[in-house]
Image (spheres, grey):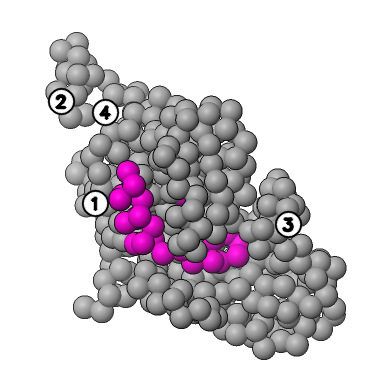
């Protein structure tokens, strides 16, 4: 079977069989906080971990477990934990594996809130960090310290779409006693599987592609290592970033069409990116397919199945022209977030990355004129036609 067909089938069937009670084809939503024990004996055994079964939803719930199994299968990992938001996946992963006086090496153009969390909040707990261009090996090597515990990567980065070599970073990290976390939100397991490239933990904001319908906030953590899984589970249960069963049901439902949506949005994005690149009012377009470095091109070929559906670009008129464009487009919605069936357009410097200091933003390549477009599943011609009309007005 062609790989693309396999993945479509997997999206629809991963996570399990019909419900054993009534044969319901979709999992029932177990909207409960607690589960009754048949006897005091049974309760004791469950708490001791000597008997399988549910206790209390913060520590596990059948609907949430169905989603976790589905995501684990798609990422080709053994253990998955659903969380209340993407940020709770990020914070749980770091709090579970790092302690005070540990040091992190992070991609400089991270999701805005992740950067602020690591830089400001974790600093209060004595966790240090260095932000570097992780697409450059020498910068990662230079940032290594005796107490470095983790390399935290987003690839492609948000919003500059720079590519980091996951396999190299994982080897480098493991040689130096560190672990690697990859935020795989931008590509989804349809286009990139970091665990197979050596990453220790993969995380997602399922708010984006996995759910895909802009109606849920959620996250997920996946790993292959039992020891790390125990730490994640422990931290999730104690810090309390658990997902809700209804949220889990909706995300599971969204995953059924994940491959269809991602591949459709990617085809659209390829067309839109090409249109923008050839437009006289566009200064530059950031899209993995336009990468010119030979080395990075070979990394893209090895670790990604496609360029994805996110495009960042800058107009010749800079910020002012960008603002006019945002106000003139009609098909793409002016909103932050990404990965939904609808196209979304936003301005990183004043929106998603406004809480990052300006000098840090510029260092990460987030110029004031940069516009980010998350291409959805509308008709590509409609998107292009609309952008053309909006650009004509500038
Ligand atoms: C949205 C996003 C997050 C945070 O997820 P929430 O669900 O909003 O908490 C983290 N990383 C990336 C790359 C994101 O796009």
Disc 3 secondary structure class: loop
Q: Which residues are magenta?
A: 152-177
| Residue depicted at 17% across the width and 29% down the height | 52
| Residue depicted at 61% across the width and 62% down the height | 159
Identify the residue under disc 3.
Answer: 349
Depth-wise, is mark 4 or mark 3 nearer the camera?
A: 3
Q: CA distance from mark 3 to mark 2?
A: 52 Å
Q: Quadrant of the N terminus?
A: bottom left
Depth-wise, is mark 3 or mark 1 nearer the camera?
A: 3
Depth check: 42 or 178 in front?
178
Identify the residue under disc 1.
Answer: 16
- Sequence-wise first label, 3 or 1: 1
Depth check: 338 or 56 in front?
338
| Residue depicted at 75% across the width and 87% down the height | 280
Depth-wise, is mark 3 or mark 2 nearer the camera?
A: 3
- Residue 230: x %, y % from top left: 28, 33
């Amino acid at each position: 079977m062609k790989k693309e067909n396999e993945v479509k089938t997997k999206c629809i069937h991963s996570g399990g069989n019909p419900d054993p009670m009534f044969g319901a084809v979709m999992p029932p939503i177990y909207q409960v906080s607690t589960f009754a024990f048949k006897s005091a004996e049974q309760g004791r055994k469950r708490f001791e971990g000597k008997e399988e079964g549910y206790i209390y939803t913060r520590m596990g719930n059948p609907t949430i477990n169905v989603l976790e199994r589905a995501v684990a299968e798609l990422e080709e990992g053994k253990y998955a934990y659903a969380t209340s938001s993407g940020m709770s996946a990020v914070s749980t992963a770091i709090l579970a594996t790092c302690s005070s006086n540990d040091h992190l090496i992070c991609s400089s153009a991270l999701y805005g809130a992740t950067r602020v969390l690591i830089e400001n909040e974790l600093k209060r707990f004595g966790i240090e960090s260095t932000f570097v261009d992780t697409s450059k090996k020498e910068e990662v090597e230079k940032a290594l310290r005796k107490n470095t515990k983790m390399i935290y990567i987003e690839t492609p980065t948000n919003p500059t779409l720079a590519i980091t070599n996951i396999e190299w970073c994982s080897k480098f990290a493991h040689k130096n006693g560190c672990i690697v976390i990859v935020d795989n939100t931008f590509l989804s397991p349809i286009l990139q599987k970091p665990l197979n490239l050596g990453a220790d933990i993969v995380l997602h904001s399922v708010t984006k592609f996995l759910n895909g319908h802009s109606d849920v906030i959620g996250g997920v953590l996946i790993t292959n290592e039992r020891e790390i899984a125990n730490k994640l589970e422990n931290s999730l249960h104690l810090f309390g970033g658990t997902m809700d069963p209804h949220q889990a049901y909706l995300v599971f439902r969204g995953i059924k069409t994940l491959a269809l949506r991602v591949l459709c949005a990617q085809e659209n994005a390829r067309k839109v990116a090409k249109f923008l690149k050839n437009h006289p009012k566009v200064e530059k377009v950031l899209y993995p397919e336009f990468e010119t470095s030979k080395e990075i091109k070979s990394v893209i070929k090895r670790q990604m199945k496609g360029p994805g559906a996110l495009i960042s670009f800058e107009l010749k008129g800079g910020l002012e022209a960008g603002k006019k464009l945002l106000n003139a487009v009609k098909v793409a919605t002016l909103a932050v977030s990404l990965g939904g069936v609808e196209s979304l357009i936003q301005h990183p410097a004043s929106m998603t990355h406004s809480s990052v200091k300006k000098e840090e933003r510029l260092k990460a390549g987030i110029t004031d004129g940069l516009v980010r477009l998350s291409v959805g599943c509308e008709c590509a011609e409609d998107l292009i036609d609309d952008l053309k009309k909006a650009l004509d007005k500038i």
